[in-house]
Structure formats: structure tokens, C-alpha cells
Image: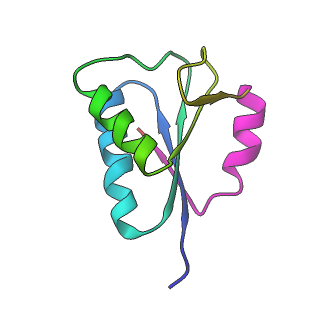
Amino acid sequence: MARKRIAVLVRDRQGEALRMSLGLLLLDDTVDVYVLDRALEQTEETGPHLEAMKEFEVKIYTNSGQGEGMERLSIGEAARRLLEYDHVVPY
């Protein structure tokens, strides 16, 4: 079976979105994370998820500030990239 490309859009429930993104990696698909419209909060919940994402080399993009290990994109560039994915999961 061909690997799917999945984009997860993170807005409000950041910890849950990051946890779900990690779970999608179990399917052996490519998962990229887009943090939109606000900075990613560093909490007890998001911290371990971000560490795991670094280990699995998950790409994280943002349009709101730049955090460690994140690539900054304009919202227009993010929208263009989303067209290339097999699945886009808003969270």
C-alpha cells in the first residue's frame, strides 16, 4: 500500500492535535503539522509530544511566530502546500 501524506492543522486543542499526529505515524504515513493563527504553547502536555516529533522527524510549520524546530510559512504558502496532501485533518 502506498504511503499517504497527511497534514494536521493545529489551532485550539494543541496537545490533543499533537498526540493525534503522533498516532497517525503508526500507519507508516508521512505526517506534517501546521500550527495556525497562534503560537504553539509550551505545556506539560505539548512538551513530550514535540520531543517525540523531533525523534520521528515530523515537519512542523507555523504562520504565527517561529518556535524551535518550526518553519515559518505565510498562510498563502501553507494553503498552497495543503493541496499536495492526501488528507488534511483540522483539529
Q: Which residue lies at the image location 28% right of the left edge and 33% below the top edge?
A: 48
Residue 12 in the image: state x and y as whole percent: 38, 24
Q: In the rendering, at what x and y percent does residue 83 appear?
A: 71, 53
Location of residue 4 with respect to 77 vertically, above or below = below
Residue plotted at (51% across, 16% down): 38
The picture quadrant where one finds residue 80 is top right
In the image, is residue 89 part of the stretch drawn in magenta?
A: yes
Q: Is residue 17 visible?
A: no
Q: How is the image coloured?
A: rainbow
Q: Residue at x 74, y 25 (%)?
A: 74
Left or right of residue 14, residue 38 in this image: right
Residue 31, horizontal then vertical, whole percent: 50, 54
Q: Is residue 45 magenta?
A: no
Q: Which residue is outermost to the left? A: 44
Q: Nearer the viewer, residue 87 or 19?
A: 19
- Direction front: furthest residue: 55
Residue visible at 55% across and 30% down?
69
Task: Tell me the magenta residue range.
Answer: 74-90
